[in-house]
Every structure is written in C-alpha cells, then in structure tokens.
Amino acid sequence: MSSERSLLGLRVAITGGTAGLGLALVQTLHARGAQIAFVARTAARVDAIERGHTGTHGIVGDVSVKEDIHRIALQILGRLGGLDILINNASELGPTPLQLLADTDCETLEQVMATNLLGPFRLTKALLGALAAAARERRGGVVLNISSDAAVNAYPRWGAYSVSKAALAHLTRIWNEESRSHGVKLLALDPGDMDTSMHARAVPDADPSELKRPAQAAEELIAAIVDLLPSETVQRKAS
Amino acid sequence: MRAASEPVQRRPASRLLLLTATGEVVHAYRHDLARFVRADDVIVANDAATLPASLAAIHARSGERIEIRLAARRSLDPREVLTFDAIVFGAGNFRTRTEARPLPPPLRVGDEVSFGSIQGVIEALLDHPRFIRLTFAATAAEVWRMLATHGRPIQYAHVQQALALWDVWTPFAANPVAYEAPSAGFALDWALLERLRARGARFVTLTHAAGISSTGDDELDARLPFDEPFSIPERTACAIQCARDRGSRVIAIGTTVVRALEAAATKEGVVHAGEGIATQRIGSTTRLQVVDALLSGAHEFGTSHYELLRAFTADERLREMSSVLEADGYLTHEFGDAIFVEADLARAPPRKRVVDRPSRRPSPRRSAEFACEACD
C-alpha cells in the first residue's frame, strides 16, 4: 500500500495538535488532503497553527477536563460534518525530573490519568456515534491511541505515565473487541522515541540525532491507519 | 401522566409498552425490545446530536436579557450556520414552564443581539412578534465556538436539574444538527444494539434536524413541526430497499425518522439516498409508505406526538393505550418510558408480507427501481 496515498476528504480529529507528534500529524495529514480538526489547550498556539495550515479547524480545549469533552466533540463534528478518524495524541508526562512512584503525589497520578486515560475514553465515547456512522458508510471509523514502550516495560521513574499508557493500551484492546459488531476499529501504537520537547523533558541528556523525527513517526502511524480503512474509502464508487 | 423528572437516558427499570398490529397491549421492559424485533427487520434511528440551542443573550436596543432558542435552518451543511430561525423568550430560566415565561421586549428588524463573544442581528420577524430570523455577524468557526462555550441544551421545566450536553446526546449521536434531542434513541445503548443484531435485524441511521417541541405560544405551537432538513445515507436507503424486497419490516426509532423516511419516499415507497427537507405533517390521513413500526417515548393523548401515531393505528386503540399507560404509571416525555407501536394491517405500508421469517437469508434480487450492492 503506497504511503503516499491521497487522503482527500477524510475527516480526522487530532488531540494535542500544536506540538511534537500531534503537530507532525496535522502537517502530514493536511499535506495529503485530509480535513482536519485539531485540539489543544493554548488559544494562541491553536490560532497560529490554524493560520499556518489553511482549511484546518483549530479547537481550544483540555481533554483532561470532563466539561470540555462535549464542547470539543461538538466543534469537531460541527466543523467537519462528521468524523472518520480520531487520534488521541494529547499526553501528559507528569512533573519532570520524573519521579519514583513512592514520591509521586496522588494528585499527579490523577492528573496524568485524566489526560492520558480518561480524556481519550470520554472523547472516544462522545465521538463513537459519528465514528460508527462513518463505519456504516464505509468511510472510516478508526481510533488511534498513541501509546509508548513505557506501556509495556517497567522503567523506573516513569510510573504515572507508564501506568496511564498501559491502561490506555488495554482499554484500546478491549474496546476494539467490543466494537467489531459496529465496525469501529481501535488501535494503540507506540511511535518510538522521538525528538520532541516532551522527550527532552523526560530524558534531558538524550542525543536528539539518535531520536526519530516526529514527521517520520507521523508517516508510519498514518500508514497503519490507512491499512485499517475500508478499501473503498479512498476511492469511493459512485452508486 | 407523570413526566420523567430525572435526566437519565436509560433508568434500570425503564419500561416498554408494545401495541401490536392486531391491537394487543404487552407490558415489557426496555431491554425486551429485541424480543419484539424479527430477523431481517431494518431498524432506522436518527443519529443527530443535539445542539446547545438555548442561548442567553442581551437585546442591545433595550438592554434586556433574553433567551434565544435556535429552532431551524435550511440545511445540514456545517458551514451554513450563520442564519437560523429562532424563538425569543424574555428573562428567566427553565424552572419556569415555557408557557409561563415573560415576553421579550418588542423586537424589530435590524435589532442587534449580543451573545458574549459574537453579535447577531434580527433579519426578519416571521409573522410573529417573537419568532425571528437571526444572522450572526461571525464566521462559522466563531459560531461553533460560541455554541460550544456559551450555549446550553434547551431545558425542560419538568426535569429538575439543568441538562448538560451529554444528557441530550443519544449513545450513537453523530452530527450536531438537532435542536432538541431525538429522544426515542435514549432507549438504545450499544449492548441493546448488539442484541438486535444478534436477532438478525439490521441497524442503520439517518440524520434529521429534530426541531423544538414547544414554543410556549399556541399560535407558534400550531406551526410545529417546522420544516426539517434530513440526510439519508446510501447504506440506509439500500437497507430499506432490501426490506421492501424481502417483505420485512422497517422500524423507526422516533417520530423524526418517520417524518424523514415518509418525506423521502416516492409514491411507490422507494427511499432514495440524499438530502431533503421534511415539510409534511403526519397524522390520521397519512398513508404510510415506508415505516411499519415505531419506537417512541410515551406522551399524553392529545399532544402533537399523538397526531403522528394516528397514521399507525386507530384512535380507539391509541385511547386505550393511553389509559393503560396512565393506569400503570408509565413515565412520559424525553427521559420517560417507551412505546413500540406496530402499524395495523389497514395502515401498514403496502408490500409483500412475510411473517415470522425463521432466519436471515441473503436476498440476491435487486429492485428494478433502486439498485443497492448487497442486502447483507
């Protein structure tokens, strides 16, 4: 399957879309012709990215806040007129330098879980009807949750983040099983260690030249999503 | 009858009353719905999500606080959200019954209205002092942002607490084009959809901009429902065609689905995919062309809701059903109990009838009128 396939008209929502991997996903999908809504917390950043990518829809919101979820969902669905693909990318590391679990405040763990687990859960639930409609219409219906190798491996000091990503990965697997009957597909993928500001905060002495470029990770993730789309999505047949 | 006053879409003991095609009344629970559905039935729901259509505003010329309830627009296009028809109320909130709300200040064409972040202007009065055409002086993106941050769902005086957006989105809500919730869909959750599929029924959706249920004014209420745009996906039109070819039933989840499908149907009962506007009223003289049965909320006899039921069955049966609902303490309105009404034999859409088909079987036959890829 060509990784350069046009994604013209596919309706994609991306959380955490103004930095790192999220921004790379916005840029790559925009270049391929997708219709994009992206979400981030800071209005000025959202406006700047929206202005720099004509036709994208910037939405200000915080996925860790329950009251924001339907406000975000309303604007995604309102502005795109539906949704084919949701990418839950927004992610929180917790305080850096990273802490031992025994030194982690309960409130920190709660906040990390709110962003990395509850946020994707709530937003997916709010958008599931639209994704199922896209699946019925053979347009799409895919949820990509951004995971990490920390979801699998027990790295000391990565506790809060790791726990949230492990839970998100398992939530994804279960929900994917449960969604088969209505055609929505969920997957969790680890993009690898990337040269992003989040990685720099977590591992300040890492050599950036040894890290993956976010644009490359974005290409790989998009290829994985395209593989899950119904075959008739990209070249729809007129009835 | 008693209105459900808690905003819970699926109470554990939600009830369901079945009125069969032969007039039999059966008491059941919501989760029993699958028992009343047959293999090959096509279940059509309205997947419209509900807008936060109630907007607190300031009427600039008088300085008075008003509430504007968005009530209609001409299309479902997400970019065409600058102009709406809307009902204006005076100060106050949902704790006052709609009929008892004070009037707004006198409204004139050209009056400006402020919604916090954006402004609007009254473009026209629609043959009534508080029914207006409103145009926002903003981009579509700004309108969506204002609705998300400033708007609230239209509230009901019979529901005790303020409704949030999640209270009024059905589990399968998709495009936000409804002004009030297509609340018959509250009865369905994903587990029940699975059970319906396991029965061999097919679940499909259309999108219909369900309008407001009450304006608090008899003259305006008499104009309800307003014209409502809808959109029918190819797969849904195809599934309905397959039901026609097989002689199996089309079950509407909610009155808005009946309105959309009957508006879209040709005289021969064929439903084509695409967009349309429902302008008709459905009542005792309507000849159903598509829909065989309806799942709906319970409502009092005599309400506009009942008018639509009269297309399905005889008045005496509806009156009897109404007294059973009353006597047995069924809860009414958006968050209440449900009724499942089968069209009686005199009123059901004309088609080949196959009763109690034992199992799903593929139907390779294609209709000459409408081709769809496959029936399964």
Image: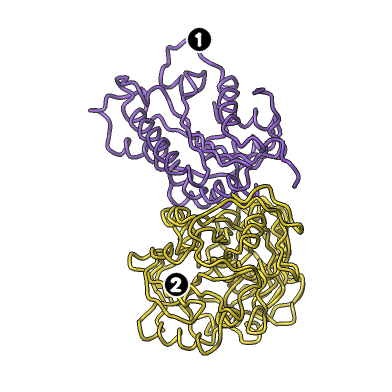
Chain colours: A purple, B yellow
> Is the residue at mark 1 from the same chain as the one at mark 2?
no
Residue B150 in the image: above or below residue B59: above
Q: Residue at x 56, y 58 (%)?
A: B49
* Amino acid at circle 1: Glu
Q: How many callouts does the rendering have?
A: 2
Task: Give neighbour class at mark 1: few <14, some 14-19, many 20+ (Cα, 10 Å).
Answer: few
Left or right: residue B344 versus residue A53 is: left
Is residue B56 visible to the viewer in this orientation of the structure?
no
Q: Residue at x 54, y 56 (%)?
A: B203
Residue closer to the observer: A7 or B216: A7
- Is B218 or B226 nearer to us in this picture? B226
The percent coordinates of residue B330 (x first, y second) are 38, 78
Is residue B102 placed above or below B54 in the rendered structure? below
Instruction: Give the Cα separation between the discs numbered 1 and 2.
Output: 61 Å
Q: Which residue is mark 1?
A: A210
The percent coordinates of residue B169 (x first, y second) are 50, 59
| Residue at which label 2 appears | B338
User: Residue at (65%, 29%) from the top-left corner?
Assistant: A27
Viewer can see residue B371: yes
| Amino acid residing under circle 2 | Ala
The quarter of the displayed image where residue A86 is located: top right
For the N terminus of chain B, the image quarter is bottom left
Task: Indicate the secondary structure of the residue bearing disc 1.
Answer: helix
Pointer 2: residues within 10 angstroms few (<14), some, or many (20+)?
A: many
Q: Position of residue B101 (x, y in %)?
A: 54, 82
In the rendered structure, the residue with mark 1 lies on which chain? Answer: A
